[in-house]
Image (cartoon, rainbow, N blue to C red):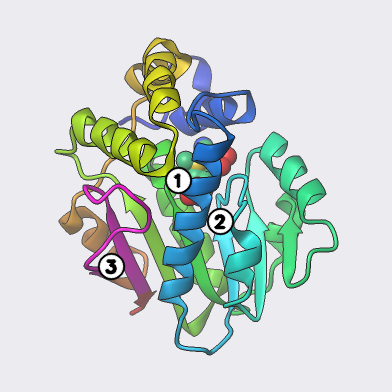
Amino acid sequence: MGDKLQGGVTSGDVWADFWSADHPIYVNARHAAVHYDRIAADLAGLLKDGSKPTVVDWGCGDAYGAPVLAKSCGGLLLFDAVGAVQRRIAARFAGAAGIRVLDDQAWRLLHDGSVDVIIMNSVAQYLSQGEFEAVLDDFRARLRKDGVIYLADIIPPDAGMLPDVVSLLATGARHGFFLAACSGLARTWFSRYRQIRNQAGFSTYSEKAIDALARKHGLSALRLPANVGFNQQRMTFRLRPA
Ligand SMILES: C[S@@+](CC[C@H](N)C(=O)[O-])C[C@H]1O[C@@H](n2cnc3c(N)ncnc32)[C@H](O)[C@@H]1O
């Protein structure tokens, strides 16, 4: 996908705008809770060596699972670039033990080499490739020499929409929101999401492409056997400074 759209805005700008307004991605509160519980459990599983690292969750969204994830961290720093999300999580986690919400300035001022683990789950698809590469450089700078980055929920170019639909319906059936999942799918189909996906694009990466991008930015990438979250047609990678 190209970086610049009409009027000089980037595809990332268009997606950031989508995420700052009300959107139908989580079909109801139960879906959001089930989604964030699963993400927190999977991410905590990746941190289970007991080292209690300093972790940044970049593009954390509403981060309902943060209190669970924070138990596996020495400190959990939450950052989301979208202002409306940032303000919501700042209010939600004010004073929460082990959790700090970063605003744009706090993220920019985070010291180089000060973070053990950076997580970016289900965000790369909303960034142009140029934006994604700039983010990788930011991550690389803030990471300790022996730190790790988890790039999760990376969508491969050949991923169809059908497995996404099946994954949502199966999760809905298992967790008691099947009917809401059906109507949520219908709402998404008629929402700006599809329109924006066609207009601004949706960044996808093969395993080889992530490997090449990691190398280009001084990192090495390893695909993990399972993706974070419910959707197993997507991929999770562990990146380390090369
Ligand atoms: C699908 S949500 C993922 C949230 C969370 N990481 C999770 O796994 O549930 C995508 C997140 O990316 C953020 N986002 C979307 N477009 C962005 C952009 N262009 N730049 C930075 N963040 C963006 C949104 O604010 C949103 O929180």
Magenta region: 222-239
| Contact check, label 1 and label 2, Cβ < 8 Å | yes
Q: Label 1: how many residues lie within 10 Å, few (<14), some (14-19) or many (20+)?
A: some
Q: Which of marks 3 and 2 is nearer the N terminus?
A: 2
- Name the residue carrying label 2: 58
161 left or right, relative to 95: left
Choose the circle earlier in sequence order: 1 or 2. Answer: 2
Q: In which quarter of the image is the C terminus?
A: bottom left
Label 1 is placed on what type of residue? Answer: Val
Please tell me in which quadrant of the rendered image residue 204 appears. top left
Mark 1 C-beta closer than 8 Å to ligand 1: yes
When the figure is inspected, residue 85 is found, relative to residue 230, above or below; the finding is: above
Q: Which of marks 3 and 1 is in front?
A: 1
Q: Residues within 10 Å of mark 2 (few under 14, many from 20)?
A: many
Q: Quadrant of residue 136?
A: bottom left
Rendering coords of residue 4 (x, y %)? 43, 26
Inspect the image, locate mark 2, and give the three-letter code of the amino acid beneath it. Answer: Trp
Q: Residue at x 58, y 35 (%)?
A: 29
**Viewer-proximal residue, 112 or 240?**
240
Name the residue: 21% across, 47% down: 233
Judged by its main secondary structure, the magenta piece is loop
Q: How far apart are marks 3 and 2 (CA)?
A: 21 Å
Rounded to the nearest whole Å, what is the CA distance between mark 3 and mark 1?
Answer: 20 Å
Q: Are marks 3 and 1 in contact (CB under 8 Å)?
A: no
**In this view, 81 is above or below 24:** below
Locate residue 211 relative to residue 143 in the image: left or right: left
The numbered disc on residue 215 is 3
| Residue corresponding to mark 1 | 123
